Amino acid sequence: MADGGLILNISDTPTLHSFQKSHSKFHKPKGNWRSNAVKRQFQGANEEPPAKRQHTPTSPKDASGPPNRKPAADPKPKKPSAGKREENQKGRSSVKTSSLFKNNPAVPEIERPKVKQLQEEVFTSDSFSELGLHPHLVSTITTVLNMTRMTSVQKLTIPALLLGKDAMVQSQTGSGKTLAYGVPLVQALQGMATKIQRSDGPYALILVPTRELALQSFTTIQKLLKPFTWIVPGVLMGGEKRKSEKARLRKGINILISTPGRLLDHIKSTKSIHFTRVCWLIVDEADRILDLGFEKDVTAILNAVNAQCPERQNVLLSATLSEGVTRLAGISLHKAVTVTEDSSSDAKPSVKPVAEPSEQSDKDASSFAMPEKLHQYAVVVPSKLKLVTLAAFILGKWKVGLYNDDDACISYSPHPQFDKNQKIIVFFPSCELVEFHHTLLSSVLAPRGPDSQKDCMAFLRLHGSMEQEERTDVFQRFAAASAGILLCTDVAARGLDLPQVTWIVQYNAPSSAAEYIHRVGRTARLGAHGSSLLILIPSESDYMRTLAAHKIGVSEMKMEEILANLLTVDFLKIARPGSKKPKATDPQAVRERATVLQTKFEDYVHASADTSLWAKKALQSYIRSYATYPKSLKHIFHIRSLHLGHVAKSFGLRDAPHNLSQQLAGNPKKQSKAKQSRTDGRKKMGGKQRLSDLLRSEYSSGFAPKAKRARAAGSEEEQT
């Protein structure tokens, strides 16, 4: 063509140059490619291009073209997504850490007032042989149960019950309360003038709150009855077949252990059950029975027993005494012996009236007795880092694995700080959260190779929505295991004796100090050593004062100390040519590995639409559980204090889902009704902030304007 302005120098074409630059990561040059990446520059207008890029003119017209044009500036590169590797200025592979460690609220300093914690001595110097028990019973306690000395609560309770007195027993969890009533019960039944027959029916009735505690109590009583084979124990609980339970009742059960709901069901529907010979009524974990809403059931059972056998010996046992327990004791106990711990002097059983509800409530609010060898810790972490912190804690206390490219387990070596396997229980507030974290942690942390079930860490789960057969199997497996990680709800928080538990982790704060006591009581049982960790977010740090008000002393653990465990985990290692092993004090290396772990969680959650929806349902369950805290703790645990974008990050979601309730609604009719009710609710709530306004991105600061804070505070007073 005649117009030479259409001929361009290809080597200086901005489009081609930008294309080559944007695709340079797919064609890495050999040799010292790092220095080339640093020194590489655009070609100037008067510079000769490299030989491989130089355009060879094919005709005189091409040679007489216009001079080289100055290339336009390249557009700004797009920011890489959070957690993805990128090429930095030095050409090294790095990890973007701003998403996980930026825009977080400051972690406040925890004010820990000096607390004089009540501690009860577990064991005494007295033995069971000093109580005048049957020699075979003493031998069974020594050889089968491996108990040579009595605990403090057993020393005080057993003599009083052998005298035939009613008793209300309050002692720290894990102090041997089952044997405190089991030993005098078996001693009394085996020594009756008329030998007990199986067909006589129940002589003793034991009520417990949960199925797992029913199985545990049945096992303990069964061991005590080993020399006395004519006394038959039995257990009734939900989840079992009524037909088989009715058959056992027809044959005869002398010591009947049951949950209140199932026993009341048999009282109404089973003709063969009767209480004409009942001489013992024992209510274990009485406060938990009332907390679960069984007060009406217990009252109906008491009425049924009173109608057939008004004279009997009654025992109430609990680690904490509440107003409801005091009320129950008032209608069931007569001239009761009250056994409580006393840090100032040696407590002795004494015949005295049960404390009034108001007096007992004041005492309950003042202090709790704690196991002597229990070490308690708390850590405050931002919401976005809760999941990573939990995983880092588990990896640090467990074994460090070596992985190949296929995520298969090659070998394991113990963590250098620990010389034994760990047995950990992690508490969550709902069944959905247990299921979600069990699948997520076991899929990401535990290897998926063919031999993983044999050598690698074992995650178990336990909650109330599981089938009874599976619940029993999990309970027995974890009790018999030497190591493992149990994720559970508060169904495992009361009375269960799980041997050799080393750590209790509370992923969410309990709703009361009493519930805290029961959770941490799963470790440091019967004089053994144990530790507990409470995970809080910055807005929940005042919960430490609540514990201090009940004389519960908790030490602080730093988040950085927990995340440093990730430096010992090989499958989180970032491959860099010539890189050295990171030091434990390198904060950047810790952040990079934490981001790699968070990316693995997010990749698993976003692998499919089903897993993403599953994570959203777990998030919704967390929000609902957060709204159930009592009024006395609303100033600490309120949904308005949550940054839901950051909370979503702890569920592996890369951003907070909008219209969460509408996304998870399955039935359009229910959805319309829910929408209508929400609309009515907004009219009543006035200036309250909508849920969609709270669902902010995890990149935002999370701080609301002052005007909105004032309106939120006013609306909160209206709600409470």
Image: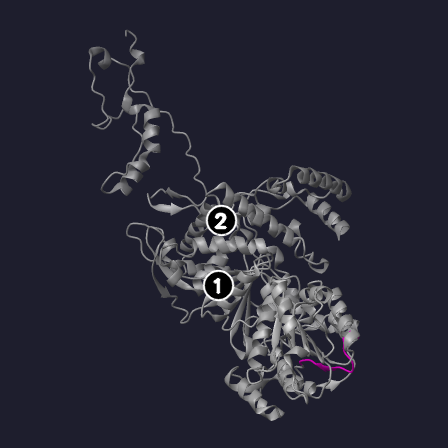
- Image coordinates of residue 573 in percent, x first then y, are 36, 54
Query: Are the residues at dot 1 and dot 2 in contact (C-beta closer than 8 Å)?
Result: no
Instruction: Left or right? Give the position of 65 relative to 390.
Output: left
Q: Which residue is under mark 2?
A: 100
Q: Nearer the viewer, residue 476 or 591?
A: 476
Look at the image and say whether residue 7 sits in the magenta stretch. no
Please name the amino acid that badge 2 sits on: Leu
Nearer the observer, 695 or 268: 268
- Can residue 82 be seen at all in this image of the molecule? yes
User: What residue is rendered at 32% in x and 54% in y?
Assistant: 404
Residue 313, image x and y in percent?
73, 81
Question: Residue 168, how many percent across, how many down?
Answer: 71, 78
| Magenta stretch contains residue 332 | yes
**Numbered disc 1: secondary structure:** strand
Disc 2 crowd rating (10 Å Cα; few below 14, some 14-19, many 20+) is many
- Asked where in the image residue 214 lies, by quadrant, the reply is bottom right
Q: Nearer the viewer, residue 684 or 89?
A: 684
Q: Residue furthest top?
A: 2
- Camera sees residue 551: no
Q: How is the image coloured?
A: one colour
Counting residues from the N terminus, which is met first, the one under dot 1 or under dot 2?
2
Q: CA distance from mark 1 to mark 2?
A: 26 Å
User: Is residue 674 rendered to the left or right of residue 599?
Assistant: right
Give the side of residue 319 with respect to residue 24, left or right.
right
The amino acid type found where label 1 is placed reads Ile
Give residue 541's position: percent from left, percent from top. 61, 60
- The circle drawn on residue 485 is 1
Residue stretch in magenta: 331-341
